[in-house]
Image: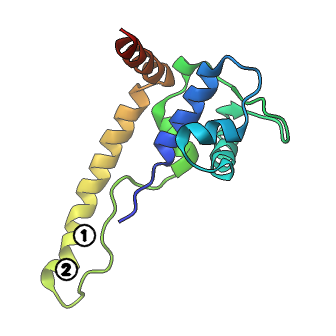
């Protein structure tokens, strides 16, 4: 099963831009940090821009955060790149002739929805600044 890293890559991009200190940051620079290709970075940056989290100009390597990190929540970033995609997924390919196969997914659906709401509530409490602070603490520990 393939899982999405779009949220962590999006946070990586935003932190990279915030911490860069350089007026110019290319998608190739960011891609090297994530170990991916620049077109993937540009795709995520376009989604972050559409969500009002990032500003950039086509053909110019000058991305900037629109809001202060303490004003951007992890949920906003998640919604920007994953839209309404749930974190947990039901298996829709179970055997329709099996009582468990037919009903287990329906039984799980309500619990998955409750878990999704709980997670989203938690994500709303975490800011980009919280993540940056944790990142900086980790750097200071490795430098010591």
Give the crowd class for mark 2: few <14, some 14-19, many >=20 residues within 10 Å.
some
Image location (x, y in percent) of residue 143: 40, 12
Give the crowd class for mark 1: few <14, some 14-19, many >=20 residues within 10 Å.
few
Quarter occupied by residue 105 = bottom left
Identify the residue shown where x is 31% and y is 66%.
90
Q: Which mark is residue 101?
A: 2
Q: Is residue 18 above or below residue 47?
A: above
The quarter of the picture where the C terminus appears is: top left
Colouring scheme applied when the structure was drawn: rainbow
Q: Nearer the viewer, mark 1 or mark 2?
A: 2
Q: Is residue 12 above or below residue 104?
A: above
Q: Earlier in the sequence, mark 1 or mark 2?
A: 2
Q: Is residue 78 visible?
A: no
Q: Which mark is residue 114?
A: none
Q: Which residue is mark 1?
A: 106
The quarter of the picture where the N terminus appears is: bottom left
Q: Is residue 2 visible?
A: yes
Identify the residue shown where x is 76% and y is 21%.
23
Which residue is situated farthest in the right direction here?
Answer: 59
* Along the viewing direction, whichever of 139 and 133 lies nearer the viewer: 139
Which residue is situated farthest in the bottom direction here?
Answer: 97
Image location (x, y in percent) of residue 38: 67, 47
Label 2 sits on a secondary structure element that is helix
Quarter occupied by residue 95 = bottom left
Label 1 sits on a secondary structure element that is helix
Which residue is situated farthest in the top direction here?
Answer: 144
Image location (x, y in percent) of residue 132: 48, 20
Total of numbered circles in the picture? 2
Identify the residue shown where x is 36% and y is 35%.
121
Q: CA distance from mark 1 to mark 2?
A: 9 Å
Image location (x, y in percent) of residue 89: 34, 62
């Amino acid at each position: 099963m393939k899982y999405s890293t779009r949220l962590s890559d999006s946070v990586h991009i935003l932190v990279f831009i915030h911490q860069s200190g350089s007026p110019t940051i290319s998608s190739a620079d960011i891609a090297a940090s994530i170990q991916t290709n620049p077109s993937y970075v540009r795709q995520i940056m376009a989604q972050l821009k559409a969500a009002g989290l990032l500003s950039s100009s086509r053909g110019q390597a000058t991305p900037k955060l629109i809001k202060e990190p303490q004003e951007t929540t992890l949920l906003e970033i998640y919604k920007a790149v994953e839209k309404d995609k749930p974190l947990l997924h039901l298996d829709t390919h179970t055997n329709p002739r099996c009582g468990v196969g037919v009903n287990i997914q329906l039984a799980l659906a309500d619990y998955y929805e409750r878990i999704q709401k709980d997670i989203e509530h938690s994500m709303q409490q975490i800011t980009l600044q919280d993540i940056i602070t944790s990142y900086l603490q980790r750097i200071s520990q490795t430098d010591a």
